[in-house]
Amino acid sequence: MVVPYKHEPFTDFKVEENKLEFEKGLMVVQSYLNKNYDLVIGGERISTKDKIVSVNPANKQEVIGTVSKATQEHAEKAMNIADETFEVWRKSKPEMRADILFRASAIVRRRKHEFSALLVKEAGKPWNEADADTAEAIDFMEYYGRQMLSLKNGVKIESRPIEYNRFNYIPLGVGVIISPWNFAFAIMAGMTAAAVVSGNTVLLKPASTTPVVAAKFIEVLEEAGLPAGVVNYVPGSGAEVGDYLVDHPRTRFISFTGSRDVGVRIYERAAKVHEGQIWLKRVIAEMGGKDTVVVDSSADIELAAQSIVASAFGFSGQKCSACSRAVILEDVYDQVLDRAVQLTKNLSLGETISPSVYMGPVIDQAAFDKIMSYIEIGKKEGELVAGGHGDNSQGFFIEPTIFADVDENARLMKEEIFGPVVAFCKAKDFDHALKIANNTDYGLTGAVLTNNRAHIEKAREDFHVGNLYFNRGCTGAIVGYQPFGGFNMSGTDSKAGGPDYLLLHMQAKTTSEML
Ligand SMILES: NC(=O)c1ccc[n+]([C@@H]2O[C@H](COP(=O)([O-])OP(=O)(O)OC[C@H]3O[C@@H](n4cnc5c(N)ncnc54)[C@H](O)[C@@H]3O)[C@@H](O)[C@H]2O)c1
Ligand SMILES: N[C@@H](CCC=O)C(=O)O
C-alpha cells in the first residue's frame, strides 16, 4: 500500500544547514557544467553536429551544457520506436508504471538540491523558486502514480443479470510532450509522467533554453527502471521538429505547455487529418495568462500589497500565473500602491548566488527585448512609479516595475508580458473591479483580497478564471491541492495536478460479456 499523497515540503533557507546543503548542490552542478547531452531514442544515445547551447541567463558567458539537436529524421526514428514500444508498454501493469514514478521521485528527492541548483543556473531561478520547482516535479510523480493506481480498475458501471459490463481506461498511443522553460523541471516532468504512467509512450521536446534539466530527468527515469523507448528525448527547434511531430499521422496526442501563439498554432495544425492517420488527435494545451489581483475596500492593506508584489515579481514575473494587473478599489488605491512601491523598491536583483537575492534575470535576449518594449509602452499608458530599467550586459536583468493609473483598456492591461511588470488600475466599485478582471482573452488565475463575504461569493461565481484565490496571491498552486489550469485562451481547460488530469491521456473502453 502506498502512503497517502502529501506535497513535498519547501526548504527553509534560514536554516544554515539547508543553505550549506544547497551550496553542495551548486558545487555538483558546477562539476558538470559545459558537458554534452545526446538525443535518447529507444535508449540509444545519438550525437548530432548541430547543438543547442544552454547558457546561464544571469551570466551569458557561462555554458550550462550543449545538447544534440534533433532533425526531422531523428523525430521520425523516435516516432517509430515510440510506436513499437507502445505495443508492449500499453500492456504493462499500472502498478509497475506507478512504481517507476515513485522510484524516480525518490531519486530526485535524494538529489533535490542538485536539481534546484541546476534550475538556478539554467533558468536563473532564485533558490526558493528553484526549490519549489523541484518539489513540484516530485509532487507530480507522487500524485500521478497514485492517480493511476486509483484508475487502474476503471469505474463501476451497472450490469443486468445475464451480463457483466466493465468500463476501463486504456492509453491513447504515442504522445508528443512540448514543455516550457519557466517550470523547466516540474512542468516537463509532470507532463511526461502523466503520459507514461497512463500507458502511453512519448517523444519529449523540452524548451531550447532549458534542455539540460530535461536530459538529467531522462537519466533519472532510466535509473528508476523505465524501459527504453517509453520516453524519447528529442530536443530541437519548435518550427522544425515541433511542427513535424504535431503533423505526424502516428501522433495520437500532443501535450503542450507554453505561449498562446504556439498553442493556437499546434491546436490548428493538430486538427488536420493527414494521410494514413486513423484518429483525431487530442491536444492538451496549457497557455498564457493575464492574471489579476483585485483589492476590495475591506481588504487587509498590508496583505494586499505583499500579495501583489510576491505574485508579480516572484521569478521575475515569468509565471503564467503571475499578477500583471492589480485592480484596486479607489478608496484604498493610494494606500495599496504606496505600500507596494515601498516593498518593490526593497527587492534585490542580481545573479541568484544566495537565498537573499529575491529576483534573478529573465530567460534570454528575446524575453529581455519584449519586456523592455512593454516598459516603453507602459511609459505612455501609465505613470512609472518603480523600476523601469534593464541591463543585459552580463545577464538579462530587469528591475521589478510598477505602472500606476493605467486605463482598464490599455495594452498593459490586456497583453501577456511575462516579465516583472505590473499595472495598477483603479476601480469604482467591486462590480467594476470584476468587470476589469474579466476583460481579457485569458482566464488562468486571479486573487481577491477582501473581508466582505458577499464579495467572496460574487467573485466565486463571476470571476472567470481556472484558479481563483482569496486573501492570498495568485501564484503557487500545489499539486493535488490546487489543480492548475485556466479557461478561454489560457488553454484547453485541463487541470495539471488534479484528479481528472490522467484521463486526458486515456480513452474509456466498455466491454460487455454475456454470462
Ligand atoms: N498554463 C500553464 O500552465 C502554463 C505554464 C507555464 C508556462 N505557460 C506559458 O508559457 C509561455 C512561456 O513559455 P515559453 O516561452 O517556453 O513558450 P513557447 O510557446 O515559446 O514555447 C513552449 C514550447 O513550445 C515549443 N515550440 C515553439 N514553436 C513550436 C512549434 N511551431 N511547434 C511545436 N512546438 C513549438 C518550444 O520549443 C517550447 O518547447 C507563457 O505564455 C506562459 O504563460 C503556461
Ligand atoms: N503552477 C504555477 C504556474 C505555472 C506557470 O507558469 C503557479 O501556480 O504559480
Image (spheres, rainbow, N blue to C red):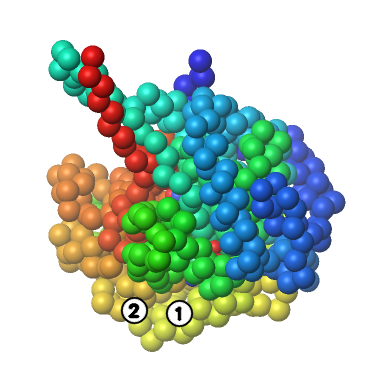
Most foreground residue, 460 or 493: 493
Q: Position of residue 53 (x, y in %)?
A: 72, 68
In the rendered image, the vertical position of residue 355 relative to residue 479, given as above or below: below
In percent of the image, x 26 and y 77: which residue is there?
Answer: 409
Mark nearer the N terminus (2 vs 1) = 1
Mark 2 → mark 1, Cα distance in angstroms: 9 Å
Q: Which quarter of the figure is the C terminus placed in?
A: top left
Can see residue 85? yes
Can see residue 359? no
Most foreground residue, 199 or 341: 199
Q: Give the residue furthest to the right.
A: 31
Which residue is label 2 attached to?
Answer: 411
Q: Tell whether label 1 touches label 2 (CB within 8 Å).
A: yes
In the rendered image, the vertical position of residue 78 relative to residue 374, given as above or below: above
Most foreground residue, 82 or 100: 82
Q: Quadrant of residue 168?
A: top left
Which residue is label 1 attached to?
Answer: 374
Task: Label 2, secondary structure: give it.
Answer: helix
In percent of the image, x 41 and y 80: which residue is there?
Answer: 378
Q: Position of residue 354 (x, y in %)?
A: 71, 52
Residue 226 vs residue 404: left or right?
A: right
* Residue neighbourhood size for the residue with mark 2, other residues' Cα within 10 Å, grouped as few (<14), some (14–19), many (≥20): some
